[in-house]
Amino acid sequence: MPMIDGEMQAYALTLDKFIDHAAKWRPNAKVVTARDDGGIHRIGYAELRDRAARVSAVLAAMGVETGQRVATLAWNSQAHVEAWYAIMGMGAVCHTLNPRVTAEQLASMVVQSAARILIASADLAPLAGQIMAGAPGLRRLLIIDGEAEGGEALEPMLAAERGTAAWGRFDETAPCGLCFTSGTTGAPKGVTYTHRSSYLHTLRALQADVMAITGEDSVLAAVPMFHANAWGLPFAAPAVGAKLVLPGRHTDGASLARLIAAEAVTMAVGVPTVWLGLVEHLEAHGGALPSLKRILVGGAPMPPALMERIEGRLGAKVQTSWGMTELSPCGTVAPLGAPSAAALSGRPAVGLDLLLTDADGVALAEQRDVEGHLRVRGASVVERYFGADASATDADGWFATGDLARIDAEGNLTITGRAKDLIKSGGEWINPAEIEAVVCALPEVSLAAVIGRCDPKWGERPILLVETQGEVSDEALLGSLRGRVASWWMPDAIYRLPRMPLAATGKIDKIRLRLEFGAG
Amino acid sequence: MPMIDGEMQAYALTLDKFIDHAAKWRPNAKVVTARDDGGIHRIGYAELRDRAARVSAVLAAMGVETGQRVATLAWNSQAHVEAWYAIMGMGAVCHTLNPRVTAEQLASMVVQSAARILIASADLAPLAGQIMAGAPGLRRLLIIDGEAEGGEALEPMLAAERGTAAWGRFDETAPCGLCFTSGTTGAPKGVTYTHRSSYLHTLRALQADVMAITGEDSVLAAVPMFHANAWGLPFAAPAVGAKLVLPGRHTDGASLARLIAAEAVTMAVGVPTVWLGLVEHLEAHGGALPSLKRILVGGAPMPPALMERIEGRLGAKVQTSWGMTELSPCGTVAPLGAPSAAALSGRPAVGLDLLLTDADGVALAEQRDVEGHLRVRGASVVERYFGADASATDADGWFATGDLARIDAEGNLTITGRAKDLIKSGGEWINPAEIEAVVCALPEVSLAAVIGRCDPKWGERPILLVETQGEVSDEALLGSLRGRVASWWMPDAIYRLPRMPLAATGKIDKIRLRLEFGAG
């Protein structure tokens, strides 16, 4: 650049700026945590920022340096948010562990990340101990949200700490977080977020046509911080100074209803099954949640009947979305102003691009109203997995999501299935997601899954597994499909489950279903 | 960074991505231009993008290269938007010229920028010719929005062009635009925008608590593209696929009323005087504009009486804001959900920080509810002016705005005056903006200005100049001030002007007022 050109300011896109912004401009806006003992803990952003800076000092004194991983095994709580900003602000990398995964798997992840410190919620101390046993590189166990045997309580160290560690002294492309994929469709892979990728993800999410969070909002994060950054809410809420409501470990309907009412929650975010629990609680026990204006759902397909129940019972608008760990995690969100439609998962906001390809990754000539394999590109999309040598993208920079999708003329995305869930029957493909969508439209069906069962003649044949909330005959279930799917797509058998098994992320656990029902 | 860390995708924040996004996801959303002949021209984003790429090819064939300045002298029109994206997309720098500035000044700016091509609206061809005469480096004059003597019409070249130039093949910190300050308080200085600074400015503006533009909006840009990027609207509208309505050269009340009604404008953006014209037109001729939900104002203080008239007559919410050329230009915007208050200019969204200092630039110990000199910092704030050797910021990276301001406990900014407008009377400072604010609160006062008049005894004494819309006595004007400002702040004289002189940017031209009335 010739000297004659002027310059705009260098201003690194680092995540510490979000909490600094909240502390300066919304010092008294609250982060609220539902405690295990039923109590509620509140803290203003200014005080939270001050505590997080002192947690950085505690970690620095323990030898944590820029670029090192620090693991967390914790529920959504104030202390977990403080640990995040402490770790990320000083340039270390927050490796979030999902307590619903086995200790063996978690230990294996920690061995890979080489974390030396594990920060755990008190009630997760037993699991933390098992992880420590399996990951000898872990030297210290710091306990938050209380005290526990076998670990050192962080709070007294924090109280004794007078200093702070310097924040933000690194490039915006420095890593800030590490999250392993749920592994529902393969071995868990680590995704390394950077300050830049999560900062830009936040700005994308805050747009009026995306999450549209404002400083007036009270946001309930019913999606866990240990999975894909709680969809970015611990960044987005302070970035606009919104109240952030954290449910701790309890996301059952009764706990959430109490919390939404007490904290005047305006926007709640989580997977569909969480809202099913909330609606069932309200239907059984009565009560209204007038403050709640909208619910952002994602992480799994939204059954239309559940969407109607939520909108009808709660009077809240449901915003559907689609994302994945590799996308930081939000991909598309249904604009607030768009009509409600359970099948539609929203549109891509600027900064994320979508492409439909064939099974070999060749772009489809027609990108609208046809089903294809979905690839994505953007500043908050993985380029290379943790520890990998090779790129996770194709030669043109597109990341293959593994999802099948359709995009309509208005740009609305519909996820039509997972490529790996496809059932091959007699040499032809059956898409279980299409069958599930039809069955889920029945008001009596809460959750439905179609998997392939080994078949000596056809290779695989589809079977249907349902969790219902009312009487519905097999004939009615099959009848709903007639004329809607090809006759050879009709399930060979129907199984009724009292509770559909869910994976660690709240999605239907198809791996377990295949183990139990897929052998034929 | 050790190899073990993964990576997120490299994805340069360049402005061509906005128009690419609109072309792909909102191909049929329209850019609408009011033509000089009273007609309306419409084009979808997909076609506009295609035309812009061909304009790039035309410019490349003329020898335009990355980093070179190309000048534009044009109204808000489709062809001007196409020229912008053509120039910026290929990595050249769009130097916007304000046709309300003298040919001599404009020629001087073009000599500095070394532009070799000038793109001008047809009716500005005479002025363009004068600029060409004063800036011999300009080799070609391309005419858009019609045809004119002395220039080559761009449209036939575009029609003949089959190729396109490659877009986006440069770093995100590459310069994209050049705009000289209005020079109302000093010599005009050039501000060089970069792709990164304008991209991040756009994401900041699109937040639900800032401009909150959605794909459902029809946005009227009544603020000129030749001044501070039309507040970023030509970037923000395609970034969300909103309809963009461009008034061409006519921003009188009748023209705007017609355009708002015809294009179902939901959001209108411009300086207060433009909306005064619209309200006066509606009051004189009747009519309603039910589609209009809100008006974003800035660029000058908002008289409370005018704000009430606008909200009362139009039924539209007024969002106040503050910015300047050096800020790309938006600094603060009143959130849509905040109560209307003419004096408040909004709050800083994340990515822009504010600091109040004393006259020497030392941060005030107390940052709330005290008046100070306003400094700012952020990714879209100038670091160094065009052609300058020295930084425009202080040692801590803060840019001194020259504005006086106050910030309340909620973070709302009130601009209380310009440091250079302060009047020194008997060795003490009088802030004319505080007097103006009180007088403007009278319903009969449309515009008010207080300037210093030379005084043999006191050095300077304040005098009041008003443009009124009804009968109001001098006594009533002075009476409004009694008890509200110190007695020695009372103006020594009152002048009534049929029309307040406005500078090229629509602000009150205090330089001219001082020339006419300041000598004493």
Image (cartoon, coloured by chain):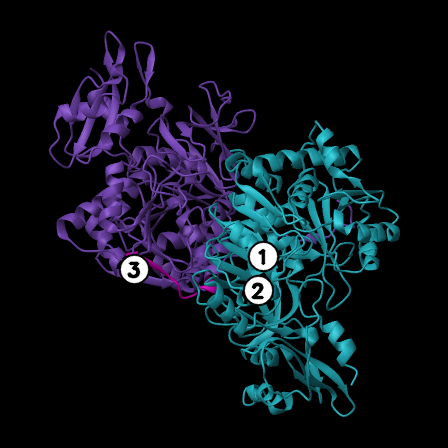
Chain colours: A purple, B cyan
Side (left or right) of A275 relative to B231: left
What is the C-alpha distance between the residues marked 3 and 2?
44 Å
Q: Is mark 2 on a helix, strand or loop?
A: helix
**Which amino acid lies under the numbered mark 1 shown in the image of this protein?**
Leu
Query: Residue A31 in magenta?
Result: yes
Choose top left, top right, bottom left or bottom right for residue B51: top right
Magenta-highlighted residues: A23-34
| Contact, mark 2 vs mark 1 (Cβ under 8 Å) | yes
**Which amino acid lies under the numbered mark 2 shown in the image of this protein?**
His
Side (left or right) of A147 relative to B209: left
What is the C-alpha distance between the residues marked 3 and 1?
42 Å
Any mark on residue B224, and which? none
Which residue is tagged 2? B281
**Which amino acid lies under the numbered mark 3 shown in the image of this protein?**
Ala
Percent x, y of residue B150: 84, 44
Percent x, y of residue A156: 35, 60
